[in-house]
Image (tube, helix red, strand yellow):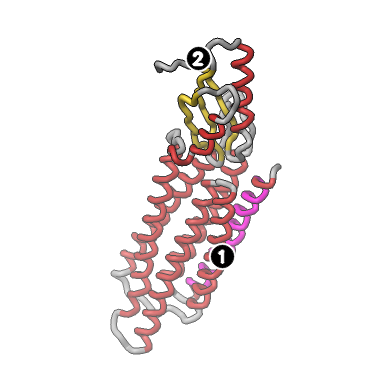
Amino acid sequence: MGERDKKVQFGAWIGIIGNLMLAVIKGITGIAADSRALVADALHSASDVVSSIAVLVGVRAAQQPPDDDHPYGHGKAETVTAIIVAVLLFVVGFEIAVGAVQSMFTELSVPGVWALYAIVFSIVLKEMMFRYKLFLGKKYHSEALKADAWHHRSDVFSSVAVLIGVGAALGGAALNIPGAVYMDPAASIVVAFLILRMGWKLGSEAVHISLDHVLHEEETTSLWRKAEEINGVMQVDELLARELGHYVIVDIKVSVDPLITVEEGHAIGKKVKQELMTFTFVEDVRVHINPYSEEE
């Protein structure tokens, strides 16, 4: 197992352990403090446990080498995982929204003040988890880890909304303001909206990548220039870099002198592959040799 695989798996484990701890703390505190918003936030953290486990499974699947059925490798497993995380966000967000709206039509009690301590602890820990996992995701080009990192950031936003809602409910009760207690479930509705929005963003990006997305022209300039510099390559006709999770597969067409031998053309193609494989994000290169023609 390489350094990338170890770091990405470590990031996934941090998510599992951290989310499990937060789900238990916020769940127990939310029930004891009679805070619907904190209980909703606990459910959000519980869904994060499931998504982090999915990330771990996806990361491990993506590490499998190419085989007969998957000659391009298993890199898309991370992208599929990102889609699963997005779906989980949608489900949790919808359930929280329904529960919050229903609670608005029932008699509520003022939440306990100790709920605030659990929320502040959650915000600090989640922000730390977000920053670390986003750093790992960007460094090692892991879509699944980046998706899970933004999942943590959605928790930060939702916990801030819960903090405002619970704080407003407590403050309203202290000032004897009628209806202030409903700020608690109102905060749950805000949490649900943020979760749904994050799910849509992550899902749309993951689906875009899964549909054989190729890097844009400005992202392949370095690859194009490297191929043009190789001795024997008279022209680069086409270069496509298909994104498969944390790596890309390059399909390139180059023109060579039409009067050289097949063996010489093969040697040039082999050199093109060797040079492009020096880029850390390139997993494989498929080279097609064309005869050079000034007319074409």
Residue at the far front in the pictured view: 294
> Is 285 or 37 nearer to us in this picture?
285
Query: From this viewpoint, is residue 271 visible?
Result: yes
> Is 168 or 211 nearer to us in this picture?
211
Residue span colored magenta: 5-30
Type of amino acid at the residue the image marks with label 1? Met
Residue that appears at 61% across and 54% down:
11
| Number of residues whose C-alpha sits closer than 10 Å to that of mark 1, classed few (under 14), some (14–19) or many (20 or more) | some
Query: From this viewpoint, is residue 91 visible?
Result: no
Image coordinates for residue 12, horizontal then vertical, percent: 60, 52
Q: Quick check: 205 above or below 164?
A: above
Q: How many marks?
A: 2
Q: Which residue is mark 2?
A: 291
Residue that appears at 53% across and 20% down:
288
| Number of residues whose C-alpha sits closer than 10 Å to that of mark 2, classed few (under 14), some (14–19) or many (20 or more) | some
Residue that appears at 41% across and 79% down:
167
Q: Is residue 63 left or right of residue 202?
A: right
Identify the image quadrant of the C terminus: top left
Image coordinates for residue 212, horizontal then vertical, percent: 45, 33
Q: Quick check: 218 above or below 114?
A: above
**Which picture quadrant has residue 217?**
top left
User: Label 2's element?
Assistant: strand
Q: Quick check: 144 above or below 225?
A: below
Magenta stretch mostly in which secondary structure? helix
Which dot, 1 or 2, sits closer to the camera?
2
Q: Is residue 182 magenta?
A: no
**Residue 128 — which label?**
1
Image coordinates for residue 87, horizontal then vertical, percent: 43, 48
Image coordinates for residue 56, horizontal then vertical, percent: 59, 47
